[in-house]
Structure formats: structure tokens, C-alpha cells
Image (cartoon, rainbow, N blue to C red):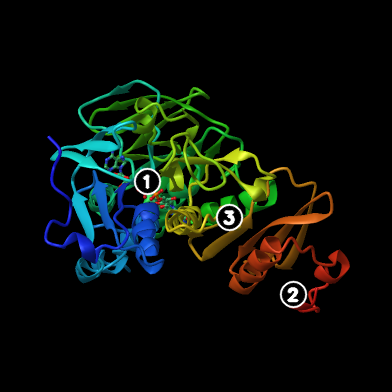
């Protein structure tokens, strides 16, 4: 059954662009796409389907301010209810899109079938599950949604929950470990790689973060795998070293996988993500993929196909496709950036440091206020800044403009950064 238009009360002649956009996913990418379409003057209908029944919210605070209680639910919502009403952006919350029919240009959702002119996959990613035997009645905890965060907070804040095992030494696992350690819990982190956040940080920064976690009493087990988990009165984890760790709660943060099955089943080309071109358009014309789910050619990775899991990527890709849909073809060309907060360490990353052949450290390492500059073939490719927000902003400008500062000046702390 094909349902009537999404805004049946609006006479057709009040919608000059008689097109409609369906967005699947109400995360950073989906909500920004709707907002940017309206900012660009798009007057057709916009409908966002969200499997998540909660009013659309930002995910980064879930492992930071929302977890430690410094940010409340209403402060992490993207937009107010009034904004959606005023901008005629229809939200279909708690509605899973089950099928996309590319030739018919329809989506099949829980409540029926809807036609589209343009379709945007903003389906994000889902947590990779621990591929080991788990015995017991409960499951370890994961964090992706607000419901997960509510459950996690409640579990961690219990008096009788003292021993915490975090599996995975990436950003999310470590932010949770930091919260638990600061709350006085006894935390063990088990990481398969030899160092923390190895995929994205150089050894020096991994060690800096490791030292901070250890200063808060976190027991770091590096280069170690968990082989099985058994829950009895406590959790018991068997490690690849032959040792065991007991815990009251186990939290898993071992990365995410792109939500691409829907696109794949619709015949859209996918591999490690939904494949898109520089306009974030998929292999099907008029159908876009943005945010965590999109495998895209990134100019800051020398045009290689990458999938980035960051707010910046979701937001900037959304802006690009909104312009394109509104008739101004806009390729995605923005410097990648990211951040994480652990204890007093606020790390901001600009650019992609993979493949660097030289690095330079500037600032006060012991005082936790410094930046690491990465070069490849004498060109600046990335900068990681700890508690140096001004360096981070300067770095983004430089990398966007393909500017490489003078190394000798950069090495001299007495010369201002913007004079290098
Ligand atoms: C705890 C946590 C902390 C983070 N911290 C940071 C940080 O500090 N800095 C940073 O840059 N990034 C951070 N991230 C990553 C960042 O939140 C993501 O990169 C960003 O949310 C991606 O936005 P998105 O819209 O692409 O995907 P998502 O936010 O994942 O949204 C996708 C939505 O699509 C919905 N969906 C999927 N399939 C369907 C379907 N078939 N039908 C209907 N709905 C569907 C999902 O339910 C989901 O709500 C963090 C993520 C988490 C989970």
C-alpha cells in the first residue's frame, strides 16, 4: 500500500520543489541533512525514519558528560520539538526501515510504504560483538544508544559494583574506564593490541594516556585477548595469557561495523560501508550515504576509500549532500577531526596521521598541554592536541589549506603558532 504524501495538509502549490527526501537514521548525519536542506531553501517534504525511539540526541556525551551526570537528557538533544514542527521535518521515531526498493523509489517501514525522490542512508554503525563464548544469564554491556547509556550508568553507579572489566582500549572503552576509575571503582582494561588507541595514535600518545589511566589505578593488560567469559556470582574472564580477571560488570568497546545490510539488500554497492563517490552518492542515482555508514574517497587520505566514525564527518557530509540535492553539486572536502576526553586530557585530532614519516612535539608534555604535528613527505598531514584548543583550530585551517609550517619555527615554543 502506498501511503498518502507526508504533508497532506500542505497544498501542493506551496511546495515549489515538488520533491521529497527520505532520510534513514536520526543521528548526527540524518538530522544535519534535514537542517541543511532547509537552510539551503529546500521546500519539499523531509521525513526521517529512526529505529531508535528516543527523541534524536547526540552520541558523544553518552560516554562523557551524560555518563558523569554533568549533562542531562535535554541538553544533548540536537533540536527542540518546535524546530522540527517549524521546519516541517517529520520524525518517525521507533520505525525501522526494512526494505528499500531502488527501481520503485520506495522504502518499506514498519508503518507502510513511502515514496521518495531522494533517499539518504544515514544509518550509522552498530557495535561489534565479542566473538567469544559467554556463559551465564546476563550479557556484558555495550554503549551505542541513550538506552545503553542509561543502563550502563545505573549499573556502574551501584555501590556493590566495584570491579569493572573493560574489554577494548579504544576511545569509548577508555572514556568509560576513566569515568569508572574517577568514581573510585577498580578498573581493568584488556586490549588485544600492544598499546591503547593504537589504530589512530602514535606510541608517544598511547603511552601518555596509559600513564594517566595507571595514575588513576587502572590495571592495563595490553596485547592480551579475552578467551571466554563466564558469569556466576561474578564475571570471570579467561585471558590469552592464562590469567583470569574477576569483575562485577563487564563493558565491551571493541569497535563498530557499518549499518549497510539495508543498502546491500537493495543492490547498492557496499564493502566496508556503503560505497559513495565524492558527492556521497551511492551506486544508485539520487541515493546518498553519509556519516558512519559511508565508505567514501577522502581527499585527506589521498583519495583512498575510508569510513570515518566522527561527528565532523557526519555533519560535513550531510551539508555537502544537502547542497547537491538543492542543485549545487558539492563534493565532500573537509579536514577530518575528532576528540576524546579522559580525566583532564582533552585530545583533539585534526587530519589523518596514518602513514606519517616524521613528527614534532610542541608544548608542555609533563603539564598535559602540548600538540603533536605529523608530516608525510615534508607536508603537514595531521595534528593531535592535548588541552591546546587553539593549536587544534590552527591545525584545521592549515591542513584544509594544505599549508605546512616552517619546522624550525614550529620547534621553537617562543614563536607563536600562527607565525610559523
Ligand atoms: C558513546 C559514543 C561516544 C562517541 N564520542 C565521539 C566523540 O567524542 N567525537 C566524535 O567525533 N565522535 C564520537 N562518537 C561517534 C559519533 O557519535 C558518530 O560518528 C556519529 O554519531 C555518527 O553519526 P551517524 O548519523 O552517521 O550515525 P548514528 O549516530 O549511529 O545514527 C544512525 C541512526 O540510524 C538508525 N538506523 C539504522 N538503520 C536504520 C533503519 N533500517 N531504519 C531506521 N533507522 C535506522 C540507528 O538506529 C541510528 O540511530 C561517539 C559515539 C558513541 C556511541
Nearest to viewer (mark 1 / mark 3):
1
Q: What residue sits right under mark 1 in the picture?
A: 120
The tally of labels here is 3
Is label 3 in a helix, a strand or a loop?
A: loop
Front-lying residue, 24 or 190: 24
Nearest to viewer (mark 2 / mark 3):
3
Residue 54 visible in the snapshot: no
First in sequence: mark 2 or mark 3?
3
**Residue sitting at x 20%, y 59%:** 12
Find the distance from the CA under tag 1 to the CA under tag 3.
Answer: 21 Å
| Labelled disc at residue 336 | 3
Residue 149 place in picture, x, y as percent: 28, 51
Find the distance from the CA under tag 2 to the CA under tag 3.
Answer: 20 Å
Q: Is residue 288 left or right of residue 409?
A: left
Residue 247 place in picture, x, y as percent: 34, 38
Q: Is residue 66 above or below residue 218?
A: below
Residue 71 place in picture, x, y as percent: 31, 67
Q: Is residue 109 left or right of residue 290?
A: left
Q: What residue sits right under mark 2 in the picture?
A: 417
First in sequence: mark 1 or mark 2?
1
Front-lying residue, 123 or 208: 123
Residue lying farthest front? 13
* Label 1, ligand 1: CB separation under 8 Å: no
Quarter holding the N terminus is top left
Q: Is residue 278 above or below residue 407?
A: above
Amino acid at each position: 500500500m502506498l501511503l498518502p504524501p507526508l504533508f497532506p495538509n500542505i497544498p501542493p502549490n506551496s511546495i515549489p520543489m515538488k520533491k521529497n527526501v527520505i532520510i534513514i537514521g536520526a543521528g548526527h548525519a540524518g538530522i544535519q541533512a534535514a537542517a541543511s536542506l532547509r537552510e539551503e531553501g529546500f521546500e519539499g517534504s523531509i521525513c526521517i525514519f529512526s529505529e531508535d525511539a528516543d527523541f534524536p540526541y547526540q552520541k558523544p556525551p553518552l560516554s562523557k558528560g551524560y555518563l558523569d551526570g554533568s549533562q542531562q537528557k535535554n541538553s544533548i538533544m540536537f533540536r527542540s520539538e518546535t524546530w522540527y514542527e517549524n521546519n516541517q521535518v517529520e520524525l518517525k521515531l521507533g520505525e525501522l526501515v526494512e526494505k528499500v526498493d531502488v527501481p520503485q523509489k520506495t522504502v518499506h517501514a514498519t508503518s507502510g510504504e513511502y515514496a521518495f525522490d531522494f533517499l539518504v542512508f544515514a544509518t550509522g554503525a552498530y557495535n561489534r560483538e565479542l566473538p567469544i563464548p559467554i556463559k551465564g544469564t546476563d550479557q556484558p554491556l555495550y554503549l551505542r544508544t541513550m538506552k545503553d547509556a542509561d543502563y550502563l550508568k545505573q549499573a556502574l553507579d551501584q555501590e556493590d559494583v566495584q570491579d569493572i572489566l573493560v574489554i577494548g582500549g579504544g576511545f569509548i572503552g577508555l572514556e568509560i574506564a576513566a569515568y569508572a576509575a574517577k568514581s573510585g571503582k577498580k578498573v581493568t582494561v584488556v586490549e588485544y593490541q600492544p598499546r591503547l588507541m593504537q589504530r589512530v595514535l602514535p606510541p608517544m600518545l598511547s603511552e601518555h594516556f596509559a600513564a594517566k589511566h595507571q595514575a588513576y589505578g587502572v590495571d592495563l593488560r595490553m596485547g592480551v585477548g579475552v578467551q571466554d567469559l563466564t558469569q556466576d556470582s561474578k564475571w570471570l574472564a579467561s585471558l590469552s595469557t592464562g590469567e583470569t580477571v574477576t569483575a562485577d560488570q563487564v563493558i565491551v568497546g571493541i569497535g563498530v561495523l557499518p549499518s549497510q545490510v539495508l543498502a546491500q539488500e537493495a543492490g547498492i554497492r557496499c564493502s566496508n560501508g556503503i560505497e559513495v563517490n565524492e558527492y556521497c552518492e551511492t551506486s544508485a542515482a539520487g541515493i546518498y550515504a553519509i556519516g558512519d555508514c559511508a565508505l567514501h574517497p577522502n581527499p585527506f587520505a589521498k583519495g583512498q576509500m575510508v569510513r570515518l566514525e566522527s561527528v565532523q564527518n557526519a555533519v560535513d557530509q550531510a551539508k555537502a549532500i544537502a547542497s547537491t540535492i538543492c542543485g549545487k553539486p558539492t563534493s565532500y572536502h573537509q579536514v577530518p577531526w575528532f576528540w576524546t576526553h579522559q580525566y583532564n586530557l582533552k585530545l583533539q585530532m585534526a587530519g589523518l596521521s596514518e602513514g606519517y614519516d616524521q613528527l614534532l612535539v610542541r608544548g608542555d608534555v609533563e603539564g598535559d598541554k602540548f600538540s603533536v604535528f605529523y608530516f608525510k613527505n615534508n607536508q603537514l598531514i595531521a595534528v593531535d592536541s592535548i588541552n591546546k584548543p587553539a593549536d587544534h583550530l590552527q591545525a584545521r585551517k592549515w591542513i584544509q589549506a594544505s599549508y605546512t609550517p616552517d619546522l624550525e619555527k614550529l620547534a621553537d615554543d617562543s614563536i607563536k603558532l600562527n607565525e610559523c
